[in-house]
Image (cartoon, rainbow, N blue to C red):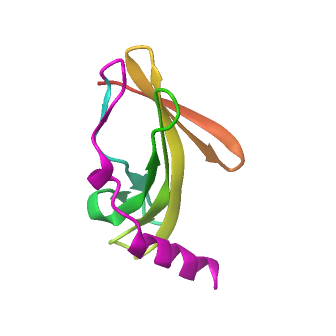
Amino acid sequence: MSKLAMMKERFINEPTFHSQLPFTFDNGFLVEDIMGECEQCGETICGDFARGNLNTAYTNTLVFDGHCLCQTCLTIFPVNGRIKEHKTNAKFEYIHKGRWVYKTFEN
């Protein structure tokens, strides 16, 4: 099975991120949806077109692994990373071109 076929199959079979949320960290920070950004056209993907699995087994960490389907250019792409509690907010961590990237959210 090709990589594209595997991504399509996972996308079809996995739940939407928003159906598994909201998630509230111990500091009160609320995560209501997981979104992706299409590298082809820059469109933000969320709602029914962002799907995958969430893992909350780690203390104050939300790990996500899934795929987004861009309705503008019909590109499917993987999305994965983690959101961790950070002071009174949260920090988004993901790997981009082999390096960890960190972004801080605010309520």
Give the residue furthest to the bottom.
1
Front in this rendered view, residue 38 or 68: 68
List x then y, in percent, for residue 30.
Answer: 29, 31
Is 5 situated above or below 34?
below
Give the residue furthest to the front.
57
Give the residue furthest to the top.
87
List x then y, in percent, for residue 67.
Answer: 47, 63
Front in this rendered view, residue 62 or 91: 62
Q: Quadrant of the C terminus?
A: top left
List x then y, in percent, for residue 70.
Answer: 38, 68
Front in this rendered view, residue 98 or 85: 85
Q: Tell me if 11 is positioned left or right of 28 in this view.
A: right
Task: Give the residue displayed 41% in from the left and 66% down from the top.
Answer: 14
List x then y, in percent, for residue 103.
Answer: 49, 31
Q: Which residues are magenta?
A: 1-28
Does the magenta portion include 76? no
Task: Give the residue displayed 48% in from the left and 78% down from the top.
Answer: 9
Does the magenta portion include 6? yes
Q: How many marks?
A: 0
Is 10 situated above or below 1?
above
Q: Tell me if 98 is positioned left or right of 83 in this view.
A: right
Q: Quadrant of the N terminus?
A: bottom right
| Rendered image quadrant of residue 52 | bottom left
Task: Give the residue displayed 53% in from the left and 73% down from the top.
Answer: 7
